[in-house]
Image: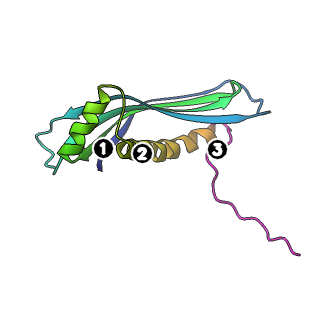
Amino acid sequence: MKLVSFNFTKINVEKLSDNLKDLKINTGVDISDIKTVKSDFLKLNGDLIAVKFNYNISYEEKIAKLDFTGNMLVSVESKEAKEVLRQWQDKKMPEEFKLNIFNIILKKASLKAIPFEEEFNLPLHIPLPSIKSQEKN
């Protein structure tokens, strides 16, 4: 599978409270549509599949929420594309395809979320590397 394009169509960030006591951060990915796309200007060795997605980060209890909606185009082998579309009729996906799609969404949307979390003075939803001093025995 090859990522051809990725874009956001909607980003919504809302801070509801400054109370960070008992903070819980939840994330979720939802695929809302999968379909094939025909392209006259892209020459690829496979079929193009368009994926519509929603990614959300929720700071509980009612502290803040970040919602990202977008589209991506991926190129997959024809056999895999047929299987993806067949399973999507029941709102399911082949496991390997699902893992790849979710990982792309998580990487792209998480990187986009970090500046918003900084701007709204929210804790980051993912841990960043840090250096700690060594304890002497």
Mark 2: give few (<14), some (14-19) or many (20+) Cα within 10 Å: few
Q: Nearer the viewer, mark 2 or mark 1?
A: 2
Q: How far apart are marks 2 and 3 (CA)?
A: 23 Å
Amino acid of disc 2:
Leu
Image point (39%, 47%), residue name: 100
Residue 119 drawn above or below residue 134: above
Q: Which of 31 and 115 is in front in this view?
A: 31
Amino acid of disc 3:
Leu
Question: By what rule are the colours in the image chosen?
Answer: rainbow
Who comes first in sequence, dot 2 or dot 3?
A: 2
Magenta part of the chain: 120-137
Who comes first in sequence, dot 3 or dot 1?
A: 1
Q: Do the residues labelled 2 and 1 touch (CB within 8 Å)?
A: no
- Toward the bottom, the furthest residue is 137
Expressed as whole percent of the image width and height from the top left, the position of residue 13 reads 56, 29
Image point (61%, 47%), residue name: 126
Q: Distance between the residues labelled 3 and 1?
A: 26 Å
Image point (44%, 46%), residue name: 103
Q: In which quarter of the image is residue 65?
A: top right
Q: Distance between the residues labelled 2 and 1?
A: 17 Å
Label 2 sits on a secondary structure element that is helix
Residue identifier under label 1: 5
Expressed as whole percent of the image width and height from the top left, the position of residue 122 reads 67, 38
Label 3 sits on a secondary structure element that is loop
Q: Is residue 59 left or right of residue 42?
A: right
Q: Is residue 41 left or right of residue 91?
A: left
Residue identifier under label 3: 124
Q: Nearer the viewer, residue 125 or 31?
A: 31
